[in-house]
Amino acid sequence: RIKTASSEEACVQAPPSTCPKRICPFPPTNAQEQLSAEMFAVRRQAAPAFFALQARRFLNLHEYQSKALLGKFGLNVQKGAVAANATEARQVAERLKTEGAKDLILKSQILAGGRGKGTLSSGLKGGVKICATPDEVEGFAKQMVGYKLITHQTGPEGQNVNKVLVHEGVDIVKELYLAIVLDRKYGGPVLIASKEGGMDIEEVAEKNPDAIHLFPVDIVNGMDKSTGLKVADALGFTSEAQKNEVAAQVEKLYKLFCDTDAVQVEINPFALTDTGDVYCVDAKINFDDNAAFRQRELFDQEDEDTKDPREAAAEKHALNYIGLDGNIGCLVNGAGLAMATMDIIQLHGGTPANFLDVGGSANKDQVAEAFRILQGDPQVKAILVNIFGGIMKCDTIASGILAAAQAVELKLPLVVRLNGTNVDLGRKILAESDVKCQVIDDLDEAAKAAVATLS
């Protein structure tokens, strides 16, 4: 990925979060690239292999959960409730109608964007519907709950719709954009505001970068009303009453961001209604998993049904795993080595099936579990182990391979490359075992051997 000496130098010096292309950390050079840098922490699905480098996962909440959290912190959200079936959806709609709702909004709940333009496996076009009556809500809900919703972010496999959100409609006269993200360049949170809401913010950045306004927040002094008023000005509010209301909403949003250990709070659209009120109409919030120990109430809300079973199994055993679409399983220690391993597999005509980092402190039981996960994946046709022993010792990996062979019959071709701490002992353990594997010293040759097993 690094083409020249000059770019390599820039790559070493620049912080990773300033990468405008989400591949390597070159610093941004214009407003459009700067926004992409700010949204680096926001659009993780755009480059899952790269974000595997971070060896972190972030809790995602459904829209109905995010809106409940917004309401808890005093932000303006529409009245509504979540429903697990069409009957419940109708009951929510009837209650909202008695409370004066004109329109009813029905939204499929999945952890992906593009729901409105998506397609349900039931044949229904669109995972978001504007309804006039509870009958309509019930009819559409029957075609949503229990089916898969396919959008441009889910891939062709889609995601299961297990719940729907029913809330009142509001007459929107202006759709705006508001977000808070963490950014290394500024050393803390950055507020992002734009008059052009209701669409993909990266599309706005591409077509009209001047429409994006950034407001770094001093993480020591925190957020004050003056910053909120600047945001209101940037969003085009002119009346003092509205500017004060927006500033208050921004301050509450920042409090939510800090108090919940969020890494991203995105309100799109942040809407102005015909009554002059502002609402958080749609929300996406991500939280730092490192804070799970003090945010237990939030993390208990995680939707386990949306997790990749392989990732869930890896998480239970403190392994960093991200599934990809190739056929060579990788077991590596260290994110950088994992990326290099995947690149070399690709270079020699193979495709990696996963990113699996056992880290520096894994024991043989964790290594054995890693092999169970790899072998349990039907698309994996061969396994390449690449270990550079530092804190992680090569004999621990070798013992883990033996434990896996005893617990789970290893049927797949196995290529092992070991180097570093206790490498001779690790190779000796494998050589004296009954495990069928190729032990190769050179990574390039090991990758070639793994690819060759597929032919």
Image (spheres, rainbow, N blue to C red):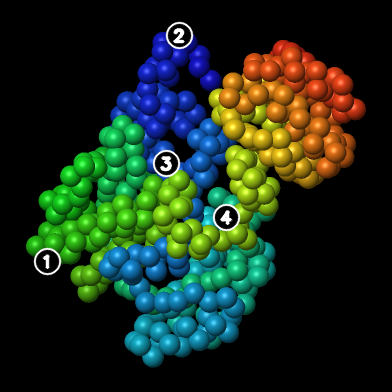
Residue where numbered disc 2 is placed = 5
According to the image, label 3 marks what residue? 41
Q: Secondary structure at mark 4?
A: loop
Determine the image quadrant of residue 158: bottom right
Residue plotted at (39% across, 41% down): 39
* Residue 79 position within the rendered picture, expressed as x and y whole percent measured from the top left: 37, 77
Instruction: Give the residue drawn at x 84%, y 24%.
Output: 437
Mark 1, other Cα within 10 Å: few <14 / some 14–19 / many ≥20: few
Real-space CA distance between mark 4 and mark 1, rounded to the nearest whole angstrom:
39 Å
Asked whether 448 or 201 is in front, the reply is 448
The amino acid sitting under disc 1 is: Ala
What is the CA distance from the residue labelled 2 to the residue labelled 4?
41 Å
The residue to which callout 4 is attached is 151
Q: Secondary structure at mark 2?
A: helix
Upstream in sequence: badge 3 or badge 1: 3
User: Up-down: is 149 above or below 8?
Assistant: below
| Image spot of residue 130 (x, y percent) | 46, 74
**Residue drawn 62% across the image and 61% down it:** 305
Residue 351: tell me if it is visible: no
The quarter of the image holding the C terminus is: top right
Image-quadrant location for residue 77? bottom left
How far apart, in angstroms, are the residues tagged by discs 1 and 2? 55 Å
Q: Are marks 2 and 3 in contact (CB under 8 Å)?
A: no
Q: Identity of the amino acid at label 4?
A: Thr
* Crowd rating for badge 2 (residues with CA inside 10 Å; few <14, some 14–19, many 20+): few
Left or right: 401, with 137 as reference point? right
Between label 4 and label 1, give the one nearer the viewer: 1
**Can you give x and y, in whole percent of width and height, for residue 177 in the image?**
31, 54
Which amino acid, mark 2? Ala
Q: In the drawing, what numbered circle is on residue 241?
A: 1
